[in-house]
Amino acid sequence: MKYISTRGQAPALSFEDTMLTGLAGDGGLYVPEEIPMLDVEAIRAMQGQKYEDVAFTVMAPFVGDTFIEAEFRALITKAYHGFDHVARAPLKELDSDLWLLELFHGPTLAFKDFAMQLIGQMFQHVLARRGQRITIVGATSGDTGSAAIEAFKGLDNVDVCILYPHGRVSEVQRRQMTTPDEANVHAIAVDGTFDDCQRHLKDMFADHGFRDDVRLAAVNSINWARVMAQVVYFFTSAVALGAPDRRVSFVVPTGNFGDIFAGFIAREMGLPIDRLVIATNQNDILHRCMQTSRYSKQGVQPSISPSMDIEVSSNFERALFWAHGRDGQVVAGLMDDLMTQGAFSVSGNAMGALADVYDSGMADEATTSAEIGRTLAMTTELVCPHTAVGVHVARGRTGSDPKIVLATAHPAKFPDAVEAATGIRPPLPKRMADLYDRSERVTRVENDLAAIQTLIREKRAE
Ligand SMILES: *Cc1c(COP(=O)(O)O)cnc(C)c1O
C-alpha cells in the first residue's frame, strides 16, 4: 500500500514513512493510493467479534508490510488495554433509532485516545527497529496534548514536548498534561494563544537545522495513522446495529474533520453508511461551506465546545481531494486561495460529490447548553458539550435509518459547561479521581520561538 499527497507534488511513501513524516513535503496530506474493500461476508463476520479483532481486519490492509500479523495484533492489544470499558467503544440507546457511541473510555477521556494510543505503540516499535530516537512536539488547545502525553509517556525512543497556551486550557486538561511524572514528558506553558503555539510549531518544522538536530516528529490530526485508527469504531458500531444488512447514519461533532473523514473511509471500504453528518458549533465554517459552496474564514469565537473551535479544518482537504476526482493540482489551488484570500469556492461538480456523502448542521451556544439539559431530563445521561452539538443536530433529522452520534468526550472533561447547563458537576471516573491531588510539573516560557527551541533542546538532553 502506497500513500500519495492531496496536492500531487510529493513522493509516494510506504505506511511506515507516512506515519513518521506526518505532513507531505508539498504541504498536502497523505492518503492511500487506493482504498481496500471489505466484502459483505467479511463485514458480517465482525458481528460479535472483539474490538481488537475488528481493528485488525479493518487496519491490516492499510499498514501493508510495515508489521507482520502477530506484531500488529500485539500492538493493537497493548493500545487498548488501558481503556476502562471492555467493549472499548460501547453503544448506548438515547431514543428510538438514536444511539450514542461512547468514545471516552480511554486514559484522557476523549476519542483522541483511540488513535494516539495505537500511534504510540506503532512509533515505539518502528523506532526501536530503526535504532532511532525522536522528539515529538505538539501544540494543543487541550485534548490532543493530553492524549499524546498519555500515549508516549515512558516510551524509550521518544521525547514528547507539548506546547499549550498558558491559562487557556481547562483545569482537567492542564492536569492531564502536567501530572504524568515520566522523565520523557515535557509540558510547556507558552505565554500566548493556541494560534501562537501552532505558529511556533510550524516554524520549528520549517527550521531544517533544528528539525534534523532533534529529529522532530508530529502527531497532529493530519497524520494518516490517526485517521486509520478511527475507521474501526464506525465498523464496530454499525455492525452492532445490523450492518451490513442495515444502513446507518453517523452524526459527528466536527472541528478538524479527522473523525468524520474516518467515517468516509469506512463507507468507501464497503460499510453501508447512508449519511455522514457534520455537526459544528457556532464556528460553523464547514456548515456554511456545505450550504453556500464557499469556504470563508470569519475569525474564531471561543465556545463551550473548545475542541471544535477552528476555522482551518485541516482534514477537509482530504474530502476535497476525493470530491475533485483526486486531482491534486485543483486542491493545491484551493489551498492557495485560502492562504492568500482567506476563502475558496467549491465547484458545482465537487459540491455534488460532497453532498452525496455529507450533510451538515449547527448548534449555537444556547442550543448546546439546552441540549445537555434536555438529554439529561429525557435519558439521565450527562453529555459533554461537543457531544450535545451532535445530539442536537441528530434530533433535527428525519429518516428511518438508525442514527449514531459520536460521543467525543466524557462530561467530566468539561465540568463547568455541564454544571452550568444542569446544576450537576460530573465526577471524574474512579481511576483518575486523584487528578486534583497529584503534583504538577510544567515549564512556563515566553511567547518566543528561539526561547521555546532552547527549552526543547535542554529538555531533550536531560
Ligand atoms: C478533537 C475533538 C473534536 C473534533 O474532532 P475532529 O476530528 O477534529 O473533527 C470533537 N470533540 C472533541 C471532544 C475533541 O477532542
Image (cartoon, helix red, strand yellow):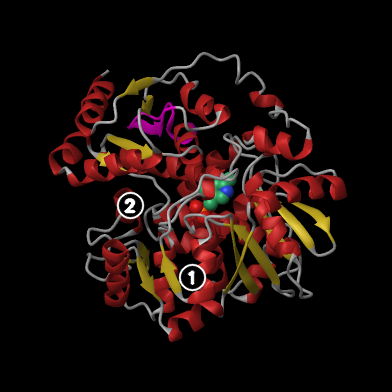
Question: Which amino acid lies under the numbered mark 2 shown in the image of this protein?
Answer: Gly
Magenta highlight on residue 151: yes
Q: Few, some or many C-alpha atoms within 10 Å of disc 2 (few <14, some 14-19, many ≥20)?
A: many
Q: Which of 134 and 138 is in front in this view?
A: 138
Lateral position of residue 419 relative to residue 96, left or right: left
Magenta highlight on residue 390: no
User: Of helix, strand and loop, which one carries label 2?
Assistant: loop
Q: Position of residue 91 (x, y in %)?
A: 74, 53
Q: Residue furthest bottom?
A: 349
Residue that appears at 66% across and 57% down: 390
- Vertical side of 269 occupied by 203: above or below: above
Residue bearing mark 1: 289
Q: Where is residue 225 in the image (x, y as percent from the top left)?
A: 43, 53
Q: Which of 207 and 101 is in front in this view?
A: 207
Boundaries of the magenta span? 150-166
Image quadrant occupied by the C terminus: top left
Residue that appears at 59% across and 45% down: 305
Lateral position of residue 380 relative to residue 19, left or right: right
Q: Note whether residue 111 is visible.
A: no
Q: Which residue lies furthest to the left in this view?
A: 209
- Vertical side of 277 occupied by 228: above or below: above
Q: Note whether residue 326 is visible.
A: yes
Please tell me in which quadrant of the rendered image residue 224 appears: bottom left
Please tell me in which quadrant of the rendered image residue 320 appears: bottom left
User: Of helix, strand and loop, which one carries label 1?
Assistant: helix
Please tell me in which quadrant of the rendered image residue 382 appears: top right
Lateral position of residue 61 relative to residue 386, left or right: left
Q: Where is residue 267 in the image (x, y as percent from the top left)?
A: 57, 71
Question: Which amino acid lies under the numbered mark 1 shown in the image of this protein?
Answer: Cys
Residue bearing mark 2: 22
